Amino acid sequence: MKAYSILFVSLIFGCFISTAQTAQRATLNITNADIDNIKIKVTQYDWAMSRWAKIKLLADEAQKDHTPIDLPLRGGNWGHYYVDPEEGKPLIPGKYLGNWHWEHYNQSHTKTYYGDETKISKDYDGVLILTQIHDHWANKLFALSLAYRIDHNKIYLQRAIEIIEAYNKNYTKIPFHDKEGGHDFNAGTGVGRIGAQALDESVWLVKILQAISLIWDDLTVQQRLETQNSFLYPAVDMIRKCHDLGIQNISNWYNAAVGMTGYLTGNDSLIQWALYENGRGLKYQIAEGFTPDGDWYENAPSYHFYALKPIILLAETAKNNGEIKFIASIKKFLDAPLQLTMPDMQMPRFNDSRDLYLPAYNGYYEYGYARFKNENYLPIINKGRQYKGGVEKVVKIGNNFDPFDFTLLYSVAIPQKETSIPSHSLHMPLTGFDVLSSGKGKETIWLASKYDINPNHGWHMHPDALDFVLFAKGQQISMDPGTAEYGAPSHVGWDKTTIAHNSLVINQTNQNFKNDKSISFGKFNGMPYSFVKTDSAYVGVSHTRAYVIADSSTILIADWINADAVSLMDISYHQRGSWQFKQDGKKWEIPDILGYKFLKDAEIILPQSKHVFSTNIKENEIAVEALSSKPVELITAIGLGQDFEPTPYAIARYKGKELFVLWSINLDGSKDKVQYELIDKNSKPKVKVVIGKKIFYLDPTGTIN
């Protein structure tokens, strides 16, 4: 009797919500006015026509397919498991074998793998169930729903309803499961049905909600009740029961999924949870999740956008329903990536980041320009509209098309003048980045140094105090490898090790996550400089590093290292290209230690006070001089670069308590360009530097004169 009463109340309440909404079309991110504007855009602008053509093609293909919608009654798997077990590179979906099984190929198509549902990390079929089945149906549903609102052709509506009804019927039949192979709601990222974690479920559900909101008022009362009670409410109930992650990019997706469901169905408790739940709602993510400069606190450019998208979606939904206070803060979050953008509009792959070409994310800036009219966004938008990869495209395994990317919704007519993002030096001590820039156009030298100041490190940060990235001659010279798929052995074994970065390693162990700090930043006689320091990456070790763009072809990195006890000091450096010149050494036995064991072709050169090597990068020889206060060994090898790119790699190695090393990166290929002299006997001495006729002094307290 009690269960019957609860069901009866639920149905009556749902009926009340649904009938109340018939007076005005349900609104999430897309309003009636937005639909009218899209209709105009797709007849006036080539880029809008092209975007709409892709969406309409997907809708037309979906409505012509009259086969019953067959959904697998097992959930999907974590996409990061979709890697070659031998090479760690992403697999390629192959032939469909029936009954939700596929062949899976390595990158060279020389090996075929088959999924094993009994081993979670080898359940490759489960990954494709998420990306090629459920994600694809979500994309089709959005395309059909938008096509119906644009063309008013009910054949689109009918097929969209069939998709919704298929999920109404089958959603709760799919068991809860997590990405560890269990069903633990308290696991780090919770459980899912469609996906293997509440994050994947939320991302997918947001797509579904955006689609359903377009046709919600075209459903019957009974269809709405069935959708919310059999599908949407069970989904968000599961998400809310999962482990509370607090301030986290994942929490933003939970909030978007729950809050948008609340707004769609008129459920105020869901809305309040998503916006104001203590320590994790949208209010708190905006207030505490970003640095004062506007960067997402994990300092990973890829995750900045990943965290920002659901914030925009939920904030816009709230605005469209009368809650406008969340919008203003978004401008700073859109401005922040421009501060760390290289001259070619790529962003450094700091922490868990992949390649991020800013114009490929121009949908965010179409939105930003429409909302805030910031003309600094125009270079991104103009290049984004011309970008061959299309507008904002985040490639997922087996699914590289997201119909909803802000572009058609928010884009407006803009000046078509050729512009670029200006490069200039920038000090961001409250975030932990300094940018040094010199020169113009193709002669621009750009260096970003990273000194994490957040002791509460996020999941996506790397132990790489005082790491840096260098851009010159139109390309990256010194790079950060970023990350590969998290299921690849190289993610923990290489990406998340200190030795994989341009940083300092003590006793072949990873750094601690502690506070670093800026000492000084400025320009002396036309030379941009930055001094940074960490005393807590290793217990009893102090490391000060200075960066100086000395002239149009010379970049200096000075390292002062002091340890309380005799320590094995490895200063690691990566430079793209192929080896052009290096001294002969003897074979070095690569240790079976995290990070180091991913090196190949390693040689060691006997201790010297000066080592020289160079690499060839697109027919440019870039030479490096390493001058040291004590004779150091130089280990040369091939390491893993971005996306497994073989990358020349050098380690300056010394065992002792004090060391100074001056690195000179010479863009003109010079190999005998810099001289230095220690001018006092302090543990961190002042240094006289001579480059041709230029003489200046570096003081580790943070001065240059």
Image (spheres, rainbow, N blue to C red):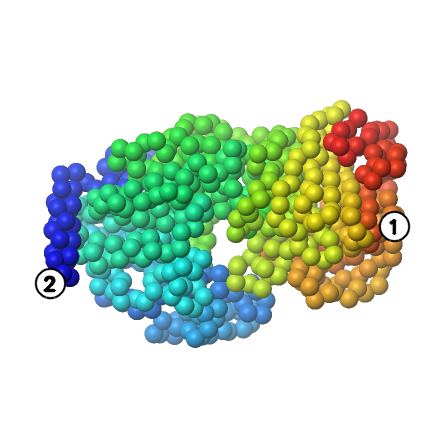
Residue 544 image point, x, y percent: 73, 40
Q: For residue 520, which numbered disc appears in the image? A: none
The residue beneath circle 2 is 1
For the residue pair 293 and 385, the one nearer the viewer reads as 293
In the rendered structure, the answer to whether residue 268 lies left or right of residue 676 reads left
Q: Position of residue 61 (x, y in %)?
A: 29, 57
What is the CA distance from the residue labelled 1 to the residue labelled 2? 85 Å
Q: On the rendered structure, is 350 left or right of 203?
A: right
- Total labels: the figure holds 2
Q: Is residue 3 above or below residue 203?
A: below
Compared with 85, 199 (above or below) is above
Cβ atoms under marks 1 and 2 closer than 8 Å: no
Query: Image quadrant for the N terminus?
Result: bottom left
Quadrant housing the C terminus: top right
Q: Residue at x 26, y 54 (%)?
A: 232
Label 1 packing within 10 angstroms: few (<14), some (14-19), many (20+): some
Callout 2 amino acid: Met
Residue 693 visible here: yes
Q: Residue at x 55, y 32 (%)?
A: 420
* Residue 39 shows in the view: no
Circle 1: residue type? Pro
- Mark 1 or 2: in front is 2
Give residue 631's mark. Answer: 1
Q: Position of residue 223 (x, y in %)?
A: 16, 54
* Kind of element beneath mark 1: strand
Lower sequence index among marks 1 and 2: 2
Relative to the observer, which residue lies in front, 625 or 54? 625
Residue located at (86% from left, 44% from top): 629
Q: Is residue 649 left or right of residue 87?
A: right
The spot of residue 268 in percent (x, y) is: 24, 43
